[in-house]
Amino acid sequence: MKYQSIKLHEKLSKFSDHWSPKVIGEMNDYQFKLVKIVGDFVWHDHQDTDEVFIVLEGEMFIDFRDGRVQVSQGEMFIVPKGVEHKPFAHQECHIMLVEPRGVVNTGGAESELTAVNDIWI
């Protein structure tokens, strides 16, 4: 067996598109995904799972119908399942998502921004 760490910056350098998560690993039924974001996303929720945002570089915000949270580099935030939210970033931000396999990044929202979640890099 070959043991090798996953170099996050190397993986992030392989793509430039925004709002399209790329799978970099799996643990049990969970996937680790990297994504670059900038601008606004869509309002959505995830009825069956919480969603965690881990900011690797930059700063993002998550709007809720009753408030907003700022998440900066080195911080994380967990959105509880069923809570409608809208992530956004004023400048490009690099984040890691940890989600159950098969979760679509817009939850149940119908949108052209819905990404395929089995893109491995």
Image (cartoon, rainbow, N blue to C red):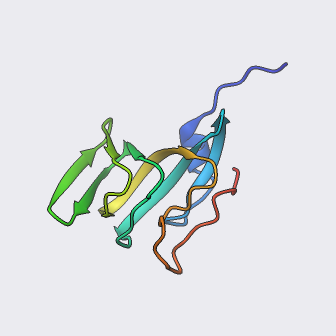
- Look at the picture and state if 33 lies above or below 90: above
Which x, y percent locates residue 3? 75, 20
**Which residue shows up at 66% across the image and 37% down it?**
26
**Which residue shows up at 47% across the image and 57% down it?**
36
Left or right: 91, with 47 as reference point: left
Image quadrant for the N terminus? top right
Numbered label tally: 0
Q: Which of 80 and 62 is in front in this view?
A: 80
Which x, y percent locates residue 24? 64, 43
Q: In which quarter of the image is residue 57?
A: top left
**Which residue shows up at 33% across the image and 35% down it?**
74
Q: Nearer the viewer, residue 45 or 16?
A: 45
Which x, y percent locates residue 80? 34, 48
Q: Nearer the viewer, residue 63 or 103?
A: 103
**Which residue shows up at 39% across the image and 63% down it?**
45
Left or right: 59, with 113 as reference point: left
Q: Quadrant of residue 16?
A: bottom right
Q: In which quarter of the image is residue 93?
A: bottom left
Which x, y percent locates residue 102? 63, 55
- Look at the picture and state if 33 lies above or below 37: above
Left or right: 76, with 114 as reference point: left
Judged from this view, the residue extending furthest toward the right is 1
